[in-house]
Image (tube, helix red, strand yellow):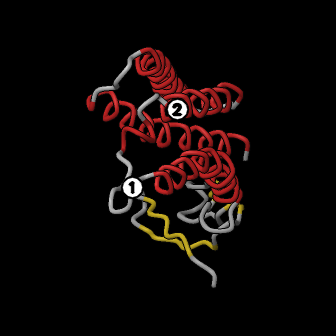
Amino acid sequence: MTALVNVNFRNYGTFESFRCGTRGELPSWKNGVFRTRVIALCSGGPMSSRVLRWLIFSIIFSLLPLGLDYLMALSRAASGSTPGFSEIIGKGELCLLAVALSAVGLGEIQGATLKGERTGIVLGGASLINLAVSMALYVMMKSSTEPSALQMIISSVFFVSTLIVSTSCIAVSEVADA
């Protein structure tokens, strides 16, 4: 199955289609005034495989210990009861994962040569915020005897935020390297 990418050139009101994963120069039109390079990144392109590897090997494998912990809690629980959310992530496990994933994303965006500075500044700043807040929250949750529901909600929110920002860092660094 070959997917097509439709590109809208507003200046000329034309639409062009290109095969996914291809690179090349568009033919000139309008007397050679407008030429551009198009990199169509979709399934099968270099970005999708790198982001897919990131999602599988970094994120899913890092969550496997939490899944096994949940299965162990299920086996220890009395019949008819299920373990609570606090038993699985109550000691800051998501925060620790968020710190590690933020650091990887920050390293990727730092090493990339980006065309626009704003993207690197925004993603780098978001990674630093996720890293600092997750680190502080991990220390708070680890030192408290009983974590509050608010701490667990905040750790979950920052974990999801870290997933989004770190995956964006990986994707942007791949586009910069292309």
Q: Is residue 164 above or below residue 45?
A: above
Q: Mark 1 packing: few (<14 Cα in 10 Å), some, or many (20+)? A: few
Q: Is residue 61 left or right of residue 6?
A: right
Q: Secondary structure at mark 1?
A: loop
Q: Which residue is mark 1?
A: 78
Give me the residue at 57% from left, 62% from top. Answer: 31
- Which one is in front in this view, the residue at disc 1 or the one at disc 2? 1
Name the spot of residue 6 as percent of width and height, x first.
49, 70
Q: Is residue 177 left or right of residue 94?
A: right
Hey, which residue is sitting farthest bottom in the picture? 1
Quadrant hosting residue 25 = bottom right
Mark 1 or 2 closer to N-term? Answer: 1
Front-lying residue, 33 or 159? 159
Q: Amino acid at mark 2?
A: Ala
Name the spot of residue 152 as percent of width and height, x first.
34, 33
Q: How many marks?
A: 2
**Is the N terminus in the top left, top right, bottom left or bottom right quadrant?**
bottom right
Give me the residue at 53% from left, 63% from top. Answer: 30
Q: Amino acid at mark 1?
A: Ala
Q: Is residue 51 above or below residue 3?
A: above
Quadrant hosting residue 35 = bottom right
Name the spot of residue 20 as percent of width and height, x first.
63, 70
Q: Which residue is mark 2?
A: 98
Front-lying residue, 172 or 5? 172
Q: Is residue 38 left or right of residue 119?
A: right
Quadrant hosting residue 22 = bottom right
Q: Mark 2 packing: few (<14 Cα in 10 Å), some, or many (20+)? A: many
Q: Is residue 64 left or right of residue 15?
A: right
